[in-house]
Amino acid sequence: METKGMEALLLGCADDMADALASGTMTLDMQVRAYDLLDMLMAQDTAQEEEGLRAASEKYRKAFEEAGEALAGLFDASELKLEAKRRLQPLESKLNEARFEAASAASLHEFAKETFEVWQTSGVFARRRALRELRARAGFRLESHRIGNYVAKTFDLMNEARTRFAKAQQAVFAADRSYKIKPGIYEEIYLRLK
């Protein structure tokens, strides 16, 4: 575990407690930082072996002792969850757009396969009607003698849209910090640092 990262989190959380008392509110960033610190502390047994960590741990303990029970009163899970949800809204709207694009691309690919089937088995008029409908839905020019290539092209478009959807989904999952909103984290850190 990197000691510089833990030292920075200890000092940051100590400052967060002072800021929370001064402003009268706890922000999502403060809560996430404390959660990450607790996670680091749980991953290793001894946090105060190095001099920098010892000093940072002492600063944290002093800040917690000053903040005391007032800090617990500032924790508002519903407000923190609302803040987390507000931060996710732009990513969720991108996710919904990507979901719609992926569904549209899959639908276009299915229609291209159906058109190819019509092209192989039907007469001239049915073939022209199917090609005209596919051209209208595709949004790009299709040549009548290369209809099989458009099944492959729409397949590629479908895969690209699915990839964009998966990336948007991963971005939402990575940015979701609501699971880090838990009461008593600062106190648990304090108890681990004793």
Image (spheres, rainbow, N blue to C red):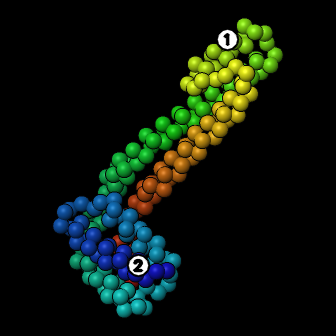
In-front residue for pair 39/161:
161
Q: Earlier in the sequence, mark 1 or mark 2?
A: 2
Q: Position of residue 191 (x, y in %)?
A: 39, 80
Q: Is residue 57 above or below residue 84?
A: below
In this orientation, does residue 78 appear? no
At 35% across and 88% down in the image, what residue appears? 52
Q: Position of residue 80 (x, y in %)?
A: 34, 55
Secondary structure at numbered mark 1? helix
Q: Position of residue 153 (x, y in %)?
A: 66, 34
At 55% across and 44% down in the image, what residue appears? 164
Instruction: Name the residue beneath numbered marker 2.
Output: 6
* Residue extending farthest right: 121
Q: Is residue 83 above or below residue 93?
A: below
At 64% across and 23% down in the image, what residue appears? 142
Q: Is residue 49 above or below residue 81?
A: below
In-front residue for pair 8/63:
8
Instruction: Name the residue beneath numbered marker 1.
Output: 129
Tell me the kind of residue under disc 2: Met
The residues bearing labels 1 and 2 have C-alpha atoms spaced at a distance of 67 Å
Task: Please tell me how crowded label 2 is: few (under 14), some (14-19), or many (20+) other residues with Cα within 10 Å.
Answer: many
Secondary structure at numbered mark 2? helix
- In which quadrant of the rendered image does the C terminus lie? bottom left
Tell me the kind of residue under disc 1: Arg
Q: Which mark lies nearer to you, 1 or 2?
A: 1
Q: Are marks 1 and 2 in contact (CB under 8 Å)?
A: no
In-front residue for pair 51/46:
51
In-front residue for pair 34/147:
147
Q: Which mark is residue 88?
A: none
